[in-house]
Image (tube, rainbow, N blue to C red):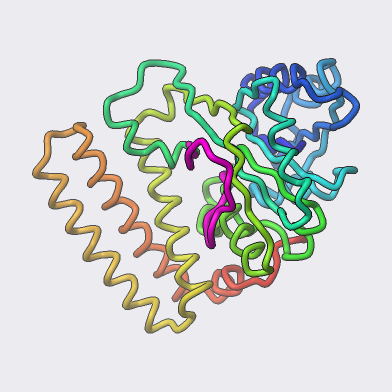
Amino acid sequence: MIIPTYKRSDPLAKALQSIGNQDAPRGSFEVIIVDNAETPTQGLQALCEETSQCTLRYVHERRTGLHNARHAGARAARGDLLIFIDDDVICPPDWLSAMIAPFDDANVAMVAGKVVLRYESSPPEWVGLFSSSLSALDLGDKAHAIPPFGSAVGCNMAVRKKALLDVGGFNPDGFGNRSLIRYRGDGESGLARKLHEAGLVVWYAPGAVLEHCVPASRMTEKYTKQRAENAGIEVVYRFYRYDCQHLVAVARFAALCAARGLCHQVLAYAKRRESPAWFRHHAAAFQHFHSVLQCGRLVCSRRLRAHTTAQTYLV
């Protein structure tokens, strides 16, 4: 089990407590904490050493980027199955068993668990519109294969180690250092896409359900706009990587995003501020404008273009 973290020890302690209560035999799994801060996070290694609920190992990966942290955890893992969660989740006792069970089928390469949101304070009325950006995932109560190019969410997923390495690992995802956010990609959904293209199965396991904690700081306009920025960059990553790598096409795509952004901004002005409809259009406009900005970065930076089309990010 691999838990990337970036300068956050308090929520991690709660996650580890819930992991220690799993009904799976204690010696059947290990937990690897990957510290993704540029310098080791104060107190984090001590927390790992003091935690007795489960077998823990601490790994420091100084290259910021969620994909780097996940890859560091994968390299350090001794087992054949890699289970990825976030440092702010709560896992019921039967979660781990349900996550592992689908791998009895040799064709299953990735398992997506259900994610429900656990609000730590009363949410504003508009928050439900953005549940997917808070990593909620509910594909129903019946287990099934996820069709191309559907994916797990990174806070509750598992993948075979061999399959992960064979397809080139994760594409870039979040960055703790926001100055590097231009290098964001499509993360776990990019990995799922590569697994689908390799003829492997991505499976949805509704019994592998956990709670993703949502603090008050993530129910604000500032945070919503940050996630919209991420989404805008990811849209351009997908367009350039999978659809078209001609710069003229990128410029046209930027014009289309600008037009859509302006439409959403006009619609936002027509709504009551901070109403659900206002938030929806305002966030959509912000996403499209950041897509325009990312297109400009691509046109101007050969390095970014090479990064976006890299065959693998396993380094």
Q: Is residue 291 left or right of residue 284?
A: right
Q: Is residue 148 magenta?
A: yes
Q: Is 124 located above or below residue 301 in the figure? A: above
Vertical comparison of 80 with 194: above or below: above
Residue 219 percent coordinates (x, y): 38, 28
Q: Is residue 54 left or right of residue 185?
A: right
In which quarter of the view is residue 93 placed? top right
Quadrant the N terminus occupies: top right
**In the drawing, does residue 45 fall left or right of residue 259?**
right
For the point 59% across and 63% down, the residue is 193
Disc tally is 0
Tell which of 261 and 277 is nearer to you: 277
Q: Residue at x 69, y 62 (%)?
A: 200
Which corner quadrant of the image does residue 53 belong to? Answer: top right
Q: Position of residue 286 (x, y in %)?
A: 30, 51
- Whether residue 96 is visible, yes or no, is yes
Residue 246: % across, % down: 45, 84
Name the image quarter holding residue 202: bottom right
Q: What residue is rendered at 34% in x and 32% in y?
A: 128
Q: Which residues are magenta?
A: 136-155
In the current view of this chain or complex, which residue is farthest to the left? 270
Q: Nearer the viewer, residue 117 or 47?
A: 117
Overall secondary structure of the magenta section: loop
Can residue 39 be seen here? The reply is no
Q: Nearer the viewer, residue 56 or 1?
A: 1
Position of residue 229 measured from the top left corner of the image (x, y, whole percent) = 40, 50
